[in-house]
Amino acid sequence: MNQRPKLSVVIPAYNEEDRIVPTLKSIDAHLEKQPYHYEIIVVSDGSTDKTVEVVQNFAKTTVENLKLNANPINHGKGFAVKDGVGMAEGEYIMFMDADNATKINEIEKFWPWFDKGYDVVIGSRHLRGDKVKVKRSLLRGLFAKGSSFLIQMVLVPGIKDTQCGFKAFTHDAAKRLFAAQTLMRWGFDFEILAVARHWGLKIKEVPVNWVHVGASRLRFVQAALRTLRELFIIKWNLMTGKYRKYEFEKYRKSG
């Protein structure tokens, strides 16, 4: 009988044929040394390159506990993560980026906070810490700081980095939060955190290593307009009780 994994690692992937296998090797090399069971879940978000093929080959020859969901149509990173969380069986469920910008060993910083009763633990590039390294273009950095300030002001005061692609959740919190998710592209990160905050879940932000890898696909003007639009959608959803039906009784706010 297979033992339930302690950790499920969800990786959304869109046209990552060149980067996904080194990332999977890095994840497996670290986790196989740990005293807990794990699974890796890759969700191809309508990839048009050989992402699906290389992951299938890697699973056959290297990692048995790897699941692949090959969506034929591109829906967005949020959709892919939601899909992966739906497949996940771990006691804790996390997602990370296919480019391996934050390596899997950073998850070891999260366990003490889960042991203290936190429901959501997220990696942050904006907290001060001895091991935090951020390398990215000036324009990308300015956009990240500006959007982070706006998201904090409107939705999640005190959370300095809502967009880092390295987040982990208890099993129950992940299943409920991603069931409530309505945004399937850019804004899903801060939607999930806004809902978690609204429900009264305990969230911890932890500094992690992060290095930008490769060329950015971000279009800054479009991203800024999309951020504003999606902030409005989330705020409206919160005001109108959109997320209420997914909420755990234990997470309801008192009063």
Image: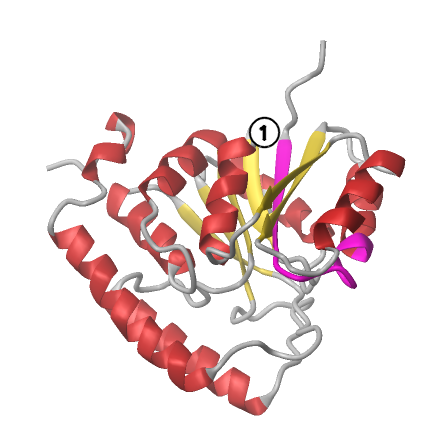
Looking at the image, residue 231 lies above or below residue 193: below
Q: Residue at x 18, y 45 (%)?
A: 242
Q: Position of residue 102 (x, y in %)?
A: 67, 61
Q: Residue at x 27, y 66 (%)?
A: 231
Give the residue at mark 1: 90
Q: Residue at x 84, y 44 (%)?
A: 29
Return the residue nearer the eye: 82 or 160: 82
Q: In the rendered image, which quarter contains the C terminus?
A: top left
Q: Residue at x 80, y 53 (%)?
A: 21
Amino acid under label 1?
Gly
Return the residue nearer the eye: 172 or 66: 66
Q: Which residues are magenta?
A: 7-22
Q: Using a 10 Å C-alpha cutoff, classify the residue at mark 1 as few (fewer than 14 neighbours), some (14 to 19) or many (20 or more).
A: many
Under circle 1, the secondary element is loop
Q: In the rendered image, which quarter contains the N terminus?
A: top right
Residue 113 vs residue 184: left or right?
Answer: right
Q: Position of residue 79 (x, y in %)?
A: 46, 50
